[in-house]
Every structure is written in structure tokens, then in C-alpha cells.
Image (spheres, helix red, strand yellow):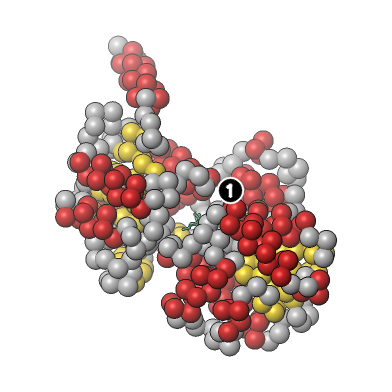
Amino acid sequence: MKKMLAVLLCMVMVFSLAGCSGGSTSTSGKGKVDVGIVLPTKDEPRWLQDKEKFESVIKDTNYSVEVLFSQGSSANEKTNVETLIAKGIKVLIICAHDGAAAAASVEAAKAAGVTVIAYDRLITGTDAVDYYVTFDSVAVGEAMGKYLADNATGQGNPLYLYAGAATDNNAFLFFQGAWNILQPKIADGTFVIKNSAEATAVQGSKELTRDQLAAIIGQVTTNWDFNEAKSKAEAHLTAVSAADKGKCYVLAPNDGTARSIADVFAADSDVSEYFITGQDSEKASVQYVIDGKQSMTVFKDTRTLASDAMGMAITVMEGKEPQTDSTYNNEKVDVKAKQTPIIVVTKENVKEALIDSGYYKESDFTGLK
Ligand code: GAL
């Protein structure tokens, strides 16, 4: 009897999942939801990875969860949050499309008595964020900067800088982290910036203000968009002479943009070799790393981040205070945060970091030794 019930329950779940549309995944089925999760877009593999991990964590709990995607729109995001509030969520886990614009959504959630957990990206300019679950984003940028610096010898190496979207607070943290390592190497002549007058203008200062960072990001942003990254890289390589190419060093802010920028550098006959960073360990970039087309990626284990966020939500629903280990200022308050460490992945440790750890299957890739 018990077995039959379990089978029936599985069937009901399969049907209700299959019936979901508009990027929503509900484990509740009845319209009542305990934890609402809002992610920025389905169009970047990174967030699908997070969704998958959330779902695997959720399977082991008694709580119901619904995941909605905002598809790169703050208006959709607001509607998603309102939909979830109407379904009675107690906790909102939200990765904002635009960190400043999302303040209004989380204020609405807060007003409805919902506990707000900012996920991966901090929401700025509001006191309505209760917790922040994140990777150490400054460490991500530092790992990228260190990779480039460790692989550079001599003087005058051409450096090309790219950044994430200015609407994403992480883009600032990543860039500042990279700058912490690169700036002294620019100051001592190891690197010469080739594509950003704004960065060149402040190359004497290690600590950049938010406005200085915003000016650089404004100039070399990819907006986290492959196509924008590609056309910027093409324009930059067209604007410089052959002498500004040769062995190039490229700070690319994430895997999606790294692949498109790498393709542009690879196609330029004046580029003899290039080193390029990335982050997220997206499958396509892991293959690029194996093939020597992308030099490194930063592995952000979304299993840990998703389970930390769900763990925090469950603690809150049990009426307890979740554990945190740091704070992040969001331009209004210090938000209590839980940070997850990151791992640098190169050709040398790709198997150990991503396959042996069970994150991906060996059969997902070719040429892995
Ligand atoms: C960031 C996130 C990165 C990357 C990027 C592009 O906020 O921390 O891991 O995915 O967005 O969406």
C-alpha cells in the first residue's frame, strides 16, 4: 500500500512539474508555497545550474518551493516576487537582475512579513534584506588577477579588461578584486592596459572608489552578454595596432563572455597567444579549458550555495537565527552574510575539481585526461 502511494505521489509530482510553464518549478502543487526563489535569467547556463541544485536540495525537505526566472527584467522580477507573496511564502531567496531596482520588490516582501535572503548578488540601497548568501566575490576577482599576473613575465604585456553589468553589485567586487592584484603589476610595468582610458587614468591607485569603478565598468562592461562581449572585443582589437597584441592578457568577468572574447582573440592573426580568465565553470567553458581555449575558470560550487540558502530558509522557518560569517554593506545597512569559498580551475586540476567532486560527469567532456 505504502509503495503504491509513493508511486502515485511520484506520478502526481511528475505531472505537476510537466504542467508548469513560464520558467516556474513548483514542488507544492497546491498553490501554497513556503520558499519562493527568484533567479535572474534562464539564458545564462549559470542560473540553470543553480536551479538544478536548488531542486536537488529541496527534494530532501518537507517544505514547498517555487522557482521563477525574471528573464533580465526588473519588471518581471517584481511580478515574480508579488506572485510568490500572494502564494504565502515565508522566505524569499532572490538573485536580483538589477541590485538597485530590486529594492522595491524586497521591500514589498518585507512588508508582507517575508524574510528576504539575497542570493549571490546583493540588493543595494535598502534595509529590507535580512541575509546574504554568496561566494567570496572579491576572492573571485583576486583569483582572476592572480592567474594573469602569475603567467606574465617581462614588461609591457598587453592587458585587456572586461567587466560584468553595472547593475550587478558583484561586477564591482570582481573588478576590485582583480584590480587588487593587477594594479601593482600595471604600476611596475608588467602590464599595459590597452582598452580602457578610464582604467589607465586611475592606474596609480590600488583602492578605487565606487565612482571610479563605475566609470571603468561603464567603459568595458559586457553586461554579462556574449554578443556585447564579442563586439567590444572586436572593436578593441580593431582599434589597436599589431604591436599592442602579440601575447595578450585578458580579464574576462565570467565564462559566457570569456568564450566569446576568447574566440575573437583566437581569430586575430596578430594575437600570438592569450591568457583569459572566467568564472562559473559552465560546461562549455570547462570544455574550452580542456581544449586550451580558455585558461582558467573559477568554480563556484552552486550545490553549496543553494544548500546554504535553503538551510538558512529552513532555519528561519523553524524560528531560529541562521549562522553568518561576515557582513556586506549595501549602501544602506550592513547585511549579515554567509560566504562560500571558491576554487580556481585550470587544465591541470579540472578533473579533480569538477569530475572527482561529482559536480559533472566525465562523459560530459571530450579529451579529458
Ligand atoms: C554574477 C554571478 C556570476 C556570473 C554573473 C553572470 O552576479 O556572481 O557568477 O554568473 O553574475 O550572470
- Residue 340 on image: x %, y %: 45, 59
Q: Measuring from the top left, give residue 333's x and y in whole percent.
A: 27, 71
Question: Is residue 13 visible from the viewing direction of this image?
Answer: no
Compared with residue 42, is residue 261 higher up or lower down, i.e. above or below? below
Horizontal placement of 117 versus 142: left or right?
left
In front here: 10 or 161?
Answer: 161
Helix, strand or loop at label 1? It is: loop
Q: Quadrant of the N terminus?
A: top left
Residue 27 vertical placement versus 265 (above, below): above
User: With 165 as the anchor, is 11 left or right in this view?
Assistant: left
Q: Position of residue 196 (x, y in %)?
A: 61, 75
Q: Report if residue 79 is visible in the image.
A: yes
Residue sitting at x 65%, y 54%: 260
Label 1: few (<14), some (14–19) or many (≥20) C-alpha neighbours in 10 Å: many
The answer to which image quadrant residue 238 occupies is bottom right
Residue linked to disc 1: 282
Residue 213 at what x, y percent from top left? 49, 75
Locate residue 143 relative to residue 100 in the image: left or right. right
Q: Residue at x 33, y 16 (%)?
A: 8
The quadrant where residue 152 appears: bottom right
User: Is 179 positioned to the left or the right of 249 in the image?
Assistant: left
Q: Residue at x 65, y 38 (%)?
A: 364
